[in-house]
Structure formats: C-alpha cells, structure tokens
Image: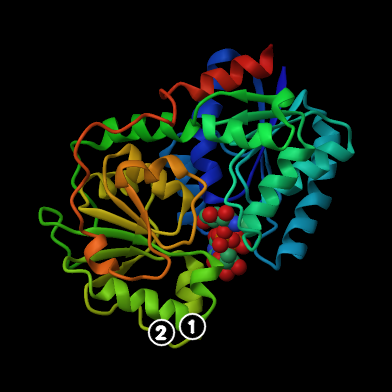
Amino acid sequence: MKVLSVVGARPQFVKLAPVAAAFAAAGVEHVIAHTGQHYDVLMSEAFFSDLRIPDPDVHLGVGSGTHGVQTGSMLAALEGVLDTHRPDWTLVYGDTNSTLAGTLAAVKLHLPVAHLEAGLRSFNRRMPEEHNRVLTDHAADLLLAPTEVAMGHLATEGLSGRARLVGDVMTDVCFLVRDAVAGASPQLPAGIDPTAPYVVATIHRADNTDDPARLDAIVKALSAVPVPVALLAHPRLRARAAEGGIDLARGSVHVTDPLPYPALVRAVLGAAGVVTDSGGLQKEAFLLGVPCTTVRTETEWTETLEDGWNVLAADLAGLDTLAVRPAPSGTRAEPFGDGHAAERVAEILQA
Ligand code: UD1
C-alpha cells in the first residue's frame, strides 16, 4: 500500500514524525511531499532532523504569499505530484493551507483522501484554519479524529459515517520526546535562569500580530509578568513588530528564535506557565502538566479548559498573574489518547 503525506507547516512536521515511524514499522510505502509553506531552517529542516523524519521525496518550494496565491500554487503543483504517484491514500494533516491544497488536488483526481486531526472546530470563521479544516473534512473520504469532542463535531455535520477515533498523534510524539529530554537543561534566551521560575510564550496568529495596537497591548501584558518570559518569536511576529515599530524585548520579555521541537518540550517542562495563541502548544502544555494562558477568544482543544489547565484571555485582563498561576490540583484527564494514535492510523489505512 502506498500513502502520500502532504505537509508544509511546522505543526505538520511534528504530526508526521510518529506517522512516518508507524508506516515504516508496518511496511507501508510512504511518499512525503513538502509544499514549502514553511522554509526557514528553524521552521522546517530542524524538525525533520530532530524528529528523525525521512527527507521529503518531493519539495515544492512554494513559500509565503496571500492565502489564495499560496494555496493555489500548492494545488497546481500537487496535482502533478499526485498524478505521478497515484497513492492508495493521500494523507493530509491538520488545518493549514497545505492541508486544503492537498485535499483539493487529490479529490479532483478521484484519489482517496484521509484527514488526520479531523473534526476540530473553533467556530470562528475569521480563522483561515477554520475554513481549511471544515472544507477538508467535507471533502475527505476518511476522517481520523483525535478526540471524542472532534467525533461529536463530525456527527453534528453528518460526517460520522467516514469518521474514526484514533487519538492524537501529537500525544505520541510529545510523550516520546518528553522522556528523551527529561535529563537535559532548558535552552532559554540569555538572561533567563532555567532553575528559577520562567514563562514560555508564543504569539503568531494574524488576529494578534497584524494590528499594531493589539500586538503592542499583548507585548505590554507580557512585559508585566512577574517572572522572565521567553518569547519564541515566529517570523511573522518579528516582521509585524518591526513594521509597527513595536519593541518586543520589554520588561520581562526576552526574545529568541522558535525552538526546535525537543528544546521546546524541554523548555515547557521546566516552565511555570505558557502563554500562547498556538493550538499545538496549548495541548503540549496540558500534556506536560504546565498551566496555559491562551490569547484567543476560543480554542479548538476545549478539553484543555477543564479544571483550569488552560484559560482563555483574549482581553489580556490579568494576564500577568494568570501566566504564573499555580497548576490545578488533582489528576488531569487524558482526553488526547494513549500515545499510540499513529499505529492506529497505519492499521486503519491498511484495512
Ligand atoms: C501557518 C498555519 C497555522 C499554523 C502555523 C504554525 C495556515 C493558514 N496557517 O501559519 O495554522 O499554526 O503555520 O507556525 O496555513 N514565514 C517565514 N518563514 C517561514 C514561514 C513563514 O518568514 O518559514 C513568514 C512569512 O512572512 C509568512 C508568514 O510568516 O508570510 C506567515 O507564514 P504562513 O505559512 O502564511 O502562515 P503561519 O502564520 O506560519
């Protein structure tokens, strides 16, 4: 059996890692097509080497652009790739423009599509990811859902017949990497003592970065956190801050580049709190037992909100104290699977 994975953006490389390993173990022929949506070394190559993912078989080098230009360029290029390989399954991951392009290209060639991380919803139609995931779920033939909540959303939309609960592949990789890095020291920006309390922060969504007043308010709130804040700056954040004349390194904030995945997991493991607008990092904080404050009005990962492990703080009120609140007492639920989701994906695709 031949599966062609379409990936392009940082969180997809993380999801690809356990899937590629499970395919190799199951003897599945696996073709990896990288759209090139992310291209900086720290946003792309570092993940392939650190997570021991085989090099992509195809690299489209599409790069950045407006949503239409970027998605359209990938769609045009992927059509030829899929027609050449004629896989038994085209596997798309998550909710990026690469996901939607891979889905459309395959569907129009009448090639079966499986969507990994199906059924997530923010119900916020301003988010490009929401368009991508809704359209992908309705076009795909097989919906591989990470959680019961996701299965519920698919049922509401009449898609239960195509849906299978597999668990979350990000749990697989997060737990493996957590165990591998436990003995290492966190790699933090100069000026932050890794043995004293600190907060890890990431901000990259357009709603938070593209309005200079909004971005300034977020940085101001971070600057008032009572412990040092390691701000892992996505290229979009740096670019928008420079354009808006906004100084990121203020007060408590220490700016550094995005971290490779193992270093990110190590940094979060040692942190007093996480502040983010990333979907993946909210869940990683939950899995690693670190309180998270999410700078958004809603989250797709609603399970993380239970017991207060994750708190939504789009209005930034009290962010400085929320960021260092103590971890909730009691045991955490385990809504994101048992760390064997990728094996289930391989089994289901082969069935
Ligand atoms: C994309 C995904 C988002 C995911 C995020 C993870 C979509 C719609 N969004 O958002 O769901 O959470 O990836 O990081 O697909 N840039 C670089 N170098 C890179 C990549 C990007 O400089 O390697 C800069 C460019 O200025 C680019 C901007 O970042 O225009 C945004 O990149 P893009 O891939 O369009 O979206 P992300 O914000 O990364």
How many numbered tags mark residues here?
A: 2
Q: Relative to residue 214, is residue 192 drawn left or right?
A: left
Instruction: Find the distance from the CA under tag 2 to the CA under tag 1.
Output: 8 Å
Crowd around label 2: few <14 · some 14–19 · many ≥20 (10 Å): some
Q: Is mark 1 within 8 Å of ligand 1?
A: no
**Residue 56 placed where, x, y %?**
62, 39
Q: Is residue 201 above or below residue 5?
A: below
At label 1, the amino acid type is Pro
Give yes or no for contact between labels 2 and 1 (Cβ–Cβ under 8 Å): yes
Label 1: element kind:
helix
Crowd around label 1: few <14 · some 14–19 · many ≥20 (10 Å): some
State the residue in front, 258 or 282. 282
**Residue 27 placed where, x, y %?**
61, 14
Q: Is residue 220 above or below residue 225?
A: below
Q: Which residue is mark 1?
A: 212
Q: Residue at x 49, y 29 (%)?
A: 18
Q: Relative to residue 74, is residue 174 drawn left or right?
A: left
**Residue 147 placed where, x, y %?**
51, 31
Q: Is residue 125 visible?
A: yes
Q: Residue at x 60, y 14 (%)?
A: 347
Q: Which residue is mark 2?
A: 246
State the residue in front, 225 or 47. 225
State the residue in front, 1 or 92. 92
Q: Which residue of the protein is positioned furthest toward the front in this rendering?
A: 156
At label 2, the amino acid type is Ile
